[in-house]
Image (cartoon, grey):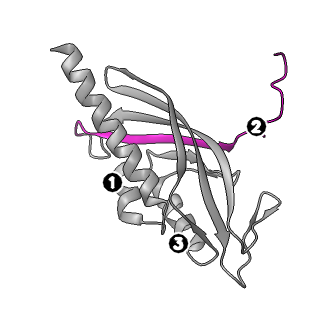
Amino acid sequence: MANENIEQDRKEILRLHNIWMRANVGFDLDGMREAFVGGDRFQGFNLNGHTYAQRAEWERLWTHLRGVMEILPATDEKILRLEVRGDAAWLAFESVIPVRAIAGAQAKSSGIELPTDTVSIKFRGSEVFVREDDGGKPAWKMWHCHFSPCAPANEPRPGF
């Protein structure tokens, strides 16, 4: 029975992760809200290098980004690890997102200016899930995420 429950938990966490990944295309606020815990419980480190302290801040970011850039569906996703321990879980993955600036928009963050031609960014992410929504009910939600660019494929890892 315990293994069956863990498998159900894994399926639900992957479902939320996939909703989140699809929500990035078009900055779908409803999809993001389904994946993230609400209120002030969520915290995330965006690929732009900035920290967002709650879901409402991420919503504000996406409202802004809709006018400056487009994200196409992610490709080459590889789940590196998914661990479930009771009412907490974490997922680590790598993926590629094609992005482009909207012509005439100022799409610059962390010193990087996006071109209007589509560029692919290989990145990695980690997500923390807790089986509790913002109302205290037992439902899996993402409480934290952290995204950062991957090192170039041809760059040797220091120490190896």
**In the rendered view, would you say 44 is above or below 68?**
above
In the picture, the quarter occupied by the C terminus is: top right
Label disc, if present, on residue 34 of the rendered structure: 1
| Amino acid marked by disc 1 | Glu
102 and 117: which is toward the camera? 117
Earlier sequence position, callout 1 versus callout 3: 1
**In the rendered view, would you say 9 is above or below 37?**
above
Q: SS at mark 2? A: loop
Q: Give left or right: position of 60 versus 4.
A: right
User: Is disc 3 surrounded by few (<14), some (14 to 19) or many (20+) residues within 10 Å?
Assistant: some
| Amino acid marked by disc 2 | Ala
Earlier sequence position, callout 3 versus callout 2: 3
127 and 61: which is toward the camera? 127
Residue identified by numbered label 3: 63
Disc 2 or disc 1, which is closer to the eye? 2
| Amino acid marked by disc 3 | Thr
